[in-house]
Image (tube, rainbow, N blue to C red):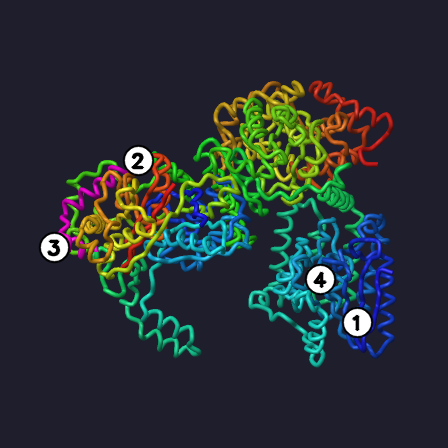
Amino acid sequence: MDRIAIVNGIRTPFCKMGTVFNDMSAQDLATIAVRELMIRQRIDGKNIDEVIFGNVAQPPDAANVSRVIALLSGIPMTTPAFTVHRNCASGIESVTSAGLKIHAGEALCILAGGTESMSNIPFFLTKELQEIISQINRAKTFAEKCNALRKFRLKYLSPRIGLSLGLTDPICGLNMGQTAEVLAKEFGITRLAQDEFALRSHQRAIKSRDLLKEEIVPVLPPPHYKQAVEYDNGPRENQTLEALAKLKPFFDKYSGTVTAGNSSQVTDGAAALLVMSERRAKDLGYEPLGYLRSFAYAGVEPQRMGIGPAHAIPKALRKAGIPLKEIEVVEINEAFAAQVLAVLKLLESNQFAAEFGYEGWTGAINPDTLNIHGGAIALGHPVGASGARLILTVLKELKRKNQHYGLASLCVGGGQGSAVVLER
Amino acid sequence: MSISFRQQNNIGFIEFDHPQAKVNILSAEVLQQFDAIVEEIKRKSEIKAVFILSKKKDIFIAGADIKEIEGINEKEEGVLKAQAGQNIFNQLEDLNILTIAVIDGVALGGGCELALACRYRIATFNEKVRIGLPEVNLGIIPGFGGTYRMPRLLGLEKGLRMIATGKVISGPEALKAGLVDRLYPAQGLEEHLLNFLEEVSPKPVTRRKPKKFKQKFLEDNPIGRLVLFKEFRRSVLESTKGFYPAPLKAVEVVEASVGKSREFALELERKGFSELVTTKVSKNLVKVFYLSEKYKKLTWPGTENLTAKPLNRAAVLGAGVMGGGIAQLLSFQGMSVRLKDINYEAIGKGLKAARKIFDQAVHKRKTSASFSRIRMAQISPALDYSGFPEADVVIEAVVENMDIKKKVFAELGKVTSPQALLCTNTSALSVTQMAQATQNPSRVIGLHFFNPVHRMPLIEIVKTDLTSLETLAAALQLVKRLGKTPIVVKDGCGFLVNRVLLGYINEAGRLLEEGAGLTQIDKLVTDFGLPMGPFLLTDEVGIDVGIKVLHILADGLGERFKPVETFEKIYKAGFLGKKSGKGFYVHGKSRSLNPKVMSMVTVHHRRAWNSQEAIDRMILLMVNEAALCLQEKIVEDPGAVDIGMIMGMGFPPFRGGLLRYADSLGIEMVIDRLRAFEKNFGPRFQPCPFLLKMQERQEKFFS
């Protein structure tokens, strides 16, 4: 069968929530990446059969954000578009959905990607206030209006914050950080190990700044268009272990180990990837960056969502028929240092492999192949975009080093894991 | 026959369809035909209702016959012509049946007045629907009852505004104003019309829009009206500066006919109309109207049959004031734009300028926020030539330096597609030299935009000897798509507008150095009718830009363009005009003379000066330069000079244009004055051979 080619990709810089991209919506960010990708790849919009973007927060002013992105990017209105949502793996889902569509013969060329503006996740009214407002709107007489207004209490004014609602699991009731605490305790991951992992993420990201620039389109943020943003703004140049050690545990104040410093940053950003059937890419004269070899999703307990990759990785490798030791570039999304470290521990466990039938497809991951340009702890985690970014980063690195096999994996809120095997 | 009448059961249909023209106009002949049909309907008692329609696409009736209006030279003739039309529309109004105008396109002037005389007006959702009384633009007021009926239909304030400003409105706006009673889709219109008839047949609707409180307060009592008309007079005077008598006359006529009978009001109207129609101002405005219609639709010999391929993708080089403005204009008109400059800071400024124009358009409700968002997203920044190979048109707007321009064009020749149109927005440099830097000079052309790009209506298309007809055709198509008016000029130093304009600016500088006051000179020029004086204009454009172009002109055309010493000093002191906050004036919330500039004026030979001489020096120098341009065939047609100077520098339309103004002085007087100036002020005033030949042959620019 024709392989799924990822011709090329590009992303905006990843910038911390409330900073330079504060005035840009998820669709604005994605549009910049898509337009630039199309111009640099010199692809005519009419060659694009479908647009699939991943997005988690789903901006209320842009329902089906993919369609909005497509039209803002100048892709012909005759090209359809849909949006995918698999929480933190939404960016990966866009690529695997594209792959399935192409394999099913439904499309030859798909613009995929992910986008997130965590700066623009709205606050919600309390249900009580909502009720009062709609009663007032329905009221026919002045007296009815007054009646409705009488129910008003000041406390109803406190908003429900969309971001924290989104980061809280509705099944187990824990927020994402608390699920990381669960894993830290279960696997005995120390505070020091987590902080060291976080420090390394920052150090690597700083060192790779100019390498990462290769995958970034500089952005002139409106409304002032003053200073071009050319780099991710999350990595801290002078990050020290001491500074990390000073931070208080955020999710479990007394016995916790997960801090803001060893968790991923809340960030805005978008990434776009041009996905085609191998033959289509050849016909259009492209030399693809690489190919999607296999992928897998796995379900786990919601309160242990961070462990997801430990299941998704062996499943994807088994489908690809490639053992872990042959993988030269690995990206596991750093939602939390504790969670990544737990995954690594479990992948080394023979008992775990035996219990789930993963024998032969697990093992130790060489730290020198893992997240070598830093991860979400330094770069940030714009939830809908991260999956697409990991694929882009792995493929660029494979190309740079002229290597063959890569792996990108994310844990997924709600209790899932996702993994893709990439090759070139 | 231009009008046909058919009857279906007891409903009549009057259909306008001029057999030889694209539009329907109300010539005397057509009016007579219409009159006959109205008489016929009057006789047929079985007819219960009449629809008046047009069979032309996107046109109802475009207005009266301007040629006829232009031909009126006696007041009595004007009175008679107006009366004839008024009588016919009175007949229409007095019909005892339902009369309904169906507007599916343009209904202007007389066409609008015809509709006003009907009982009801219906418009379609056609975007081409335009309704209004633009007569003041021709220096007259409506003469077929418009001044009587419009204020009675819309209310005094709104109705008078329509007449005095000549504002033309769309279908939805007309519905909102109460000018039309319904909007219907053009699809299946006839059924809608019949339904409407059933709706209004049993009980006629009299007044459509209830008056709002403010309207009642102002319009329904004499004191309110006094305030209303006073305010109107003030704002009309402010916008016309007293040069255009028509709007003021409109206020006068409407005020005097408040509460009066139709007969009385119409008599006032035709009196006012006939007074205006014979004025020089009106005659000049009609000429300018013809000119601008001609140039808006300009074609060039040999390009008529060339269909240029559609232009969808553009690239702009240089994101300065001009580049940013051009990028905005291109994206506003639906093209995607790649905007390149040498660093992001420069591009950021261009994007910000573009965004500001979009934001203003949204603020003024000219466009919606979503439209402006998608158009803004169409401009993408670049530091390299990515995106240029796909561009259908490239417009270069980098710094005015020939070496850089040549380098840029050499690169463009390599990176762009061989079919792409390559344009330079130079204001004075040789387009030919730039063209020669590419492998194929035939696809290079100059497009000289004026600042601010989104507001200035003119573009000079600079054709070199190497430019192909295909390229010219594509450039003409682009300019029209951008909603601008083109003039085609030959590639000579400074082209037309800047060359003529800067001679005048420099002359103003010389007057300054002879001891004339800066604000006095500016006032002199605005009193002549220009929107601003030479120094304020220079501040708007930028003193640095002016100096630069003057140097280019001096190098190419001679000493007469060498910038006066004072300009150089002011420039070196860093006063660049509005963009730096200070130029000849200090630009803040209010404007005041820059005190530091006054001390920099080098007074060479102080002399007594009088205003007539000063204005003649500035204007006649332009006439002489323009004549020289005609002699050198920079432009072929004096009309191009007039439209160029009206749209490029704001030469007052009521004077008919620069060369028509010269015609009104007479060639003898022009040459006499130039000769006198030559003796007193130097050879720059020496009348050029073109003028001398005109004198010899006793010719005018416009015969």
Tell me the CA gap for discs 4 and 1: 24 Å
Decide: few, some or many residues near mark 1? Use Cα within 10 Å; few <14, some 14-19, many ≥20.
Answer: some
Who comes first in sequence, dot 4 or dot 1?
1
Q: Are marks 4 and 2 on the same chain?
A: no
Identify the residue under disc 4: B104
- The answer to whether residue B339 is above or below residue B82 is above
Identify the chain of the residue marked 2, using the numbered disc in the image: A
**CB of mark 2 within 8 Å of CB of mark 1?**
no
Evaluate whether label 4 is on the same chain as label 1.
yes
Q: Which mark is drawn over residue B9? A: none
Residue type at mark 3? Ser
Q: Main secondary structure of the magenta part?
A: helix
Q: Which residue is mark 3?
A: A255
Number of residues whose C-alpha sits closer than 10 Å to that of mark 3, classed few (under 14), some (14–19) or many (20 or more): few
Nearer to us in this view, B333 or B23? B333
CA distance for labels 3 and 1? 94 Å
Name the residue located 44 percent from the left edge and 78 percent from the top edge: A140
